[in-house]
Amino acid sequence: MAAIFAFAESRDGALRKVALETVTAARRAADATGGGEVHAMVLGGPGIADAAEALGRAGADVVFTVEDAALARYSPEVAAATAAAAIADGDYRAAFFPASAEGRDLAPRVAAALDRSLLADVTEFTFEGDDVVASHPAYAGKAVATLRLSGAPALLSVRPGAVTAVEAPRTPRVEARPPALAPAEARVVVTGLVARGAARLDLAEAPVVVAGGRGLRAAEHFGLVEALADAIGDAAVGATRAVTDDGWRDPADQIGQTGRVVSPDLYIAVGISGAIQHLAGMRSSRVIVAINRDKDAPIFKVADYGIVGDLFDVVPRLTEEIRKLRAG
Amino acid sequence: MKIAVCIKRVPDTEMRFTIAADGKSVDPTGLKYEMSTFDEYAVEVALRLNEQHGPGDVTVVGLGPDGVGEILRKALSMGVDRGVHLTAPEVPFDGRVVAGALAEALTGQGYDLILFGRNATDTGAGVVGAMTAGRLGLPCVTAVSHLEIANGRGTARRELEGATETVEFPLPAVLTIDEGIARGRIPSLKGIMAAKKKPIDTREASLGAPAIVVDRLAPPPDRPPGRIVGEGPDAVPELVALLRDEAKVL
């Protein structure tokens, strides 16, 4: 029986949250296509094989571990060659990648190496006979495309957060594999990795995102947003394009069509009017709260809960109430 | 340097649009088009590189129907030297097919750099750049937010979740351009006049059969109607209660 391949992303010797989501997606695909095995692959420096246990808990029957001191950092060409070789050598119905920053880089390389098409950045998928049918948000979030890919192996990358990782524990068979391309042969080499604002959760992974817009009026007022995020605890801070363009925040904090796409459990929009390009980056959040002076602002059309008012009064009060809740 | 930039014509992202009667495409009636945002950044990067490193030659390549000529012309008015229009009735959703046609047009032309936008703002898959690099056998760096070129080598920065990566690569190479590196310049009147005399080579795109087809294109599911909890700070306690007890997110 055909199996399902899952690429398990790691960074700095540890699995990323999306690795477990990818294995869960693969497990779901395997169960939907007759209950075949899930084969997960993880690359990294010495010790990365320890990740096999967590991948087994997430539903991997087999874990391919590719350990090499030169793979402590992501090596796009080595990862692509090694994943492509594994997919080509096996009997796979489908192969899953995360549509994370690394996965968006890797998956099309693997697809090119295999000369296969790729269903990129999908939020849902089903198997229909020889086809995979998947949803992909397109046109700046103004439309959802339902795409049909025929043939096997079907390659898919899944939007982070679109699949919730669930446990499907088993004790995996662990198989060490060599890199399919010697790391020294790679032309493209990652020479540095610097964490940005390590004190705070990343936008893509935080269960809560607090984002600020032009309504904050000046860079220093972002302290209000930071304080609210601190009170909540497990929150990341984002911004609109107008704000990053003005240099109030780092471009990497931008949420929207030309920035990051997030879908946290809770999104709090502070002083954000809700331009279509911004909505493209956050409208799939589970619960949206908007705080804005203008009751006609488009952000209220997508918000589950809104407060109309001056954010300089409302946000400090919200921070205070959440602190009380957390303390109580 | 000899640089090619692959650009896509997409519906203006600020416009509302309707789904066509076939339920699979955008209704073109009254629709305005533009160069995809990240592709415009890529054009700007190409122009700046040659401004820094001495004279060079920049070609823009666009694939699609007649209207593609307009965005090629816009790039020429920004300062690009020449255009290539690969004609096709539409741009297939399957990036592999697009990459095949682009690779065929780009191969053997001696480009030092081939640039793409990170992704198109319509289909938003972000796969064509890396797939084209694969076809051409060239090194590739995706989602570049900062770039330096010296002595036939490049150093690029990429923004990851919570971290910034530095990547080194040899030329020739394929790069896809992200936010943060450059915004497209506004064409000058002189540039617009000069663009009229610049060459656009038009030929048919050689598109293979796609494995991905569009079954349906639909507006995103409506969010359930929300409510205004109240006005001003006095509404905050109720909001917190709702977030805790009803939405269960606090």
Image (cartoon, coloured by chain):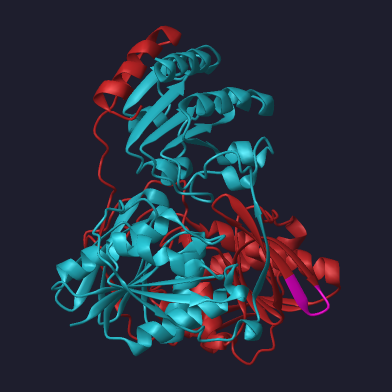
Q: Classify the position of the C terminus of chain B by image quarter.
A: top left
Q: Is residue A11 left or right of residue A262?
A: right
Q: Which chain is cyan?
A: A
- On the image, which quarter does residue A30 sit in? bottom left
Give the residue displayed 27% in from the left and 37% down from the top: B223
Front residue of A173 and A211: A173
The location of residue B143, given as percent across then percent down, is: 58, 63
User: Is A322 inside the magenta-drawn segment?
Assistant: no
The location of residue A39, given as percent across then percent down, is: 32, 74
Q: Is residue B1 left or right of residue A262?
A: right
Secondary structure mostly seen in the magenta stretch = strand
Q: Is residue A144 above or below residue B7?
A: above
Give the residue displayed 44% in from the left and 65% down from the top: A50
Q: Is residue A143 visible?
A: yes
Give the residue displayed 63% in from the left and 92% down from the top: B108
- On the image, which quarter does residue A122 sit in? bottom left
Q: Is residue A20 above or below residue B249?
A: below
Front residue of A228 and A136: A228
* Colour for chain B in the figure: red
The location of residue A51, given as percent across then percent down, is: 43, 64
Which residue is situated farthest in the bottom direction here?
A: B108
- On the image, which quarter does residue A254 sit in? top right
Q: Which residues are magenta?
A: B150-154
Q: Is residue B215 visible?
A: no
